[in-house]
Amino acid sequence: MSTADDRCRRAGFTVLEAIVAVVVSVIVVIVAIPLLYRGTQALRRSGCAYNLRALGQALDAYQTAHSGAFPCGARYQMSPESPWGPSWWTELLPYVAQDGGKMHWEQVRCSGDFGGEEVNPNLKLVDGLLPTVMRCPASSLPPLSDPNKTYSQANRDSLDHPAKGVALPDYVALAGSAPDMMNIRPDQSVIGPHGRNTRDGPWGILSGSGAFPPNQAMRHASLRDGVGNVIIVGEQSTWGIDPYYNPPLQYDLRSSFPDGGYKGAGGNYGGLNPEAEGINGSGDDRCFNITTVRYAINAVTLDAEKLPKGIVANPIGPPPRLPRDKKPKNIPQHPTGPGHNHGIFSVHVGGANVLFGDGHVEFKSEQMDLPTLQMLVTRDDGHVAKK
């Protein structure tokens, strides 16, 4: 007859059984962690993709109301505030179901700039406004501009509350590609009011080969490669990084920084002149909230002394701590604001969400070769690029 001690020993784990249990547990954890990580990343991407689909639906509604035309990407329009006109956001937001109807945009359409000495009558409505469709839920970028840099003192004084700033969107409209995928060389492609690429200047190459060129509202039919084959909007939802520093130095590379989502073009681009740098939009006048693809997806690792051409940025935050074994590095004092070629970059690992002309959204890999990406953002190069 068995004793109580025998029954207790039989009820417990043997050493071998305990080892097997531990091994199985480790295997389960090893398998589960990547699955959990992929699931988390997919969830983070889904909120961003939802916003882009909402933008696609808004664009469809806008086109229905405007005879098949897209909004103008970035407009030059003289106003009491400044020559800076509005961006595509001011035209589109009234058609976004989740954000439309919250304010009247007519006065914002007159000027996208809030820095002039004439008080913008719509500033009180714009200040601090954060349309949800502008923000990637996973992004850690600042949601609002610095009002001390964005607004004039007169405009700050006109508010009946402390200034908050203008919304900085995480999505950018695509003006086209550089070089032009119609095989037009950048130095030969200044060809008039409906020109393609301008000259390569201090701000980079500005293109008109995509869905959202400056000062021109493209029609649906102009996407001759097929609306399902042309990328029209992409993400700009993560930091530019200079890994030299400890901690790495961060740059805000969004095409809306530092003046917000409602600012458009500084030049009319009506008579592009290759002999007159900076005159009438020859490539030196900035355009906010649109970008020309010159680099691959997620090309955000920078060298502060050798920023890629067409990338203009100021470091964010306090001066960095430098490694002891290296001499301090001179950070170039670039003019505040975007260049023309900040491109597509995402907080999501491995690629970025993009919106196509027919309203569908895809997650494009950062491994995509640059010519293919440039074909996908060009509206009429005659090539249906592989996806």
Image (cartoon, rainbow, N blue to C red):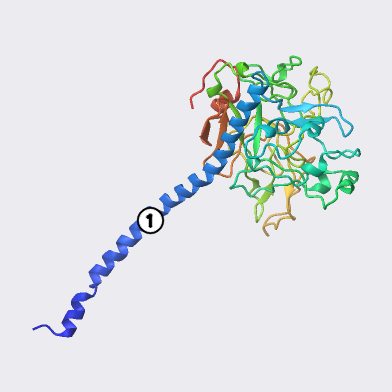
Residue 334: quadrant of the picture:
top right
Say whether residue 177 is visible.
Answer: no
Residue 90, percent from left and from top: 73, 33
Residue 251 at what x, y percent from top left? 69, 46
Q: Quadrant of the N terminus?
A: bottom left
Residue, disc 1: 30
In percent of the image, x 31 and y 62: which residue is there?
23
Position in image of residue 138 (x %, y %): 58, 48
Image vertical order of residue 192 relative to residue 13, above or below: above
In this rendering, would 200 be left or right of 36? right
Q: Quadrant of residue 197?
A: top right
Question: On screen, 11 above or below 219?
Answer: below
Residue, far front: 101
Find numbered disc 1 in the image and state the secondary structure of the residue it sits on: helix
As drawn, the residue found furthest toward the left would be: 1
Residue at (55, 43) in percent of width and height: 47
Give the image location of residue 143, x and y in percent. 69, 47
* Residue 16 seen in this snapshot: yes
